Image (cartoon, grey):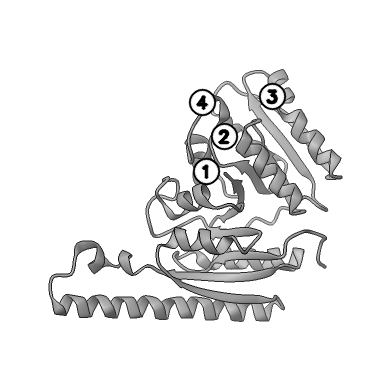
Amino acid sequence: MNQVSNLKRVLVGVGGSANGHVAVDFSTQFANRYGCRLVGIDIVDEDDTELAIYGVADETAEAERRREILQLRERARQNLDAFRQRCKAAGITAECCEKNGDVAEQIVAEAQRSDMIILSRDTPFESATSANSTLGKVLRQASRPLITVPLSLPQQDHVLVAYDGSRSAGQALLAFVTLGLGTGRMVHVATAAAAAESARSIAQPAFDFLQLHGVDCQLHAIEAETKREHALLSLAAEVDAGLLVAGACGHSRIREFLLGSFTQTLIEASHLPLFLFH
């Protein structure tokens, strides 16, 4: 049964990763729950082929490069066909989008037509936590929130909002609530700080905002001098969270730029889907 939400169109990366099928599985569950349309996207970057990177020496090498591009395009079509069939079997309205060009740029451009992006956390490019990786570029440039999906999907349904009072945390919370993703779910809002009183004062506005919108929620003030990311992840396990919501700019108190240690830890150490917004 579909839950009431404002989601209409969700962009799903179906290629570019050996674990792309996990993003597809998550997105079909998501669409069944919220009744949204899914748009599968796969991109062929001709400038990212092996011969393009190392240079084309002669006509033979150029012919090999063209064959490599044709193989990549065929693989993209296969990925999109599999996505289409998966959605059809699940009774989900879906469409496919094959693009050419820089992977992150194409995702960011197409996301302007959508409410949200879903990508597999594992990519074949650079480290997923690098600001220059596909994930890092999409987080930095996209005007839409992103859910990044781990290798295995959790069965739990609760939500943990990791809130530090920063602009990015506020934007992530606003997007989460506006899209209606907290409806019918228990949402735990948590802040970790050196003193529990400070943590509570930071988390309280987020808790009040959730209550204002009729979201069933609980507040958690965590006293932690260091490794606050790990304290939040431990809480996520305790409350049976199946989704973690956070801003994508690191901890506000140390002014980290995109994909600083806070976001890196969440991506690398968390086994949960992450709802992130920059």
Spatial CA distance of label 1 from label 3 is 22 Å
Q: Earlier in the sequence, mark 1 or mark 4?
A: 4
Spatial CA distance of label 3 from label 4 is 16 Å
Q: Earlier in the sequence, mark 1 or mark 3?
A: 3
Say which mark, if any, is on residue 96.
none
* Residue type for callout 2: His
- Front disc: 3 or 4: 4
Residue assigned mark 1: 269
**Viewer-proximal residue among 30 and 59:** 59
- Front disc: 4 or 2: 4
Across the whole image, how many numbered discs are drawn on residues?
4
- At numbered mark 3, what does the secondary structure look like: helix, strand or loop? helix
The vertical placement of 60 against 203, above or below, is below
- At numbered mark 4, what does the secondary structure look like: helix, strand or loop? helix
Residue assigned mark 4: 254
* Residue type for callout 4: Ile
Picture quadrant where residue 147 is located: bottom right
| Residue 37 seen from this side | yes
Contact (Cβ within 8 Å) of mark 1 with mark 2: yes
Where residue 133 sits in the image (x, y, percent)? 41, 51
- Within 10 Å of disc 4 (Cα), the crowding (few <14, some 14-19, many 20+) is few
- Within 10 Å of disc 1 (Cα), the crowding (few <14, some 14-19, many 20+) is few
**Viewer-proximal residue among 101 and 163:** 101
Q: Earlier in the sequence, mark 1 or mark 2?
A: 2
Where residue 129 sits in the image (x, y, percent)? 45, 46
Say which mark, if any, is on residue 230.
2
* Residue type for callout 3: Ala
- Front disc: 3 or 2: 3
Q: Residue at x 60, y 49 (%)?
A: 274
Residue assigned mark 3: 199
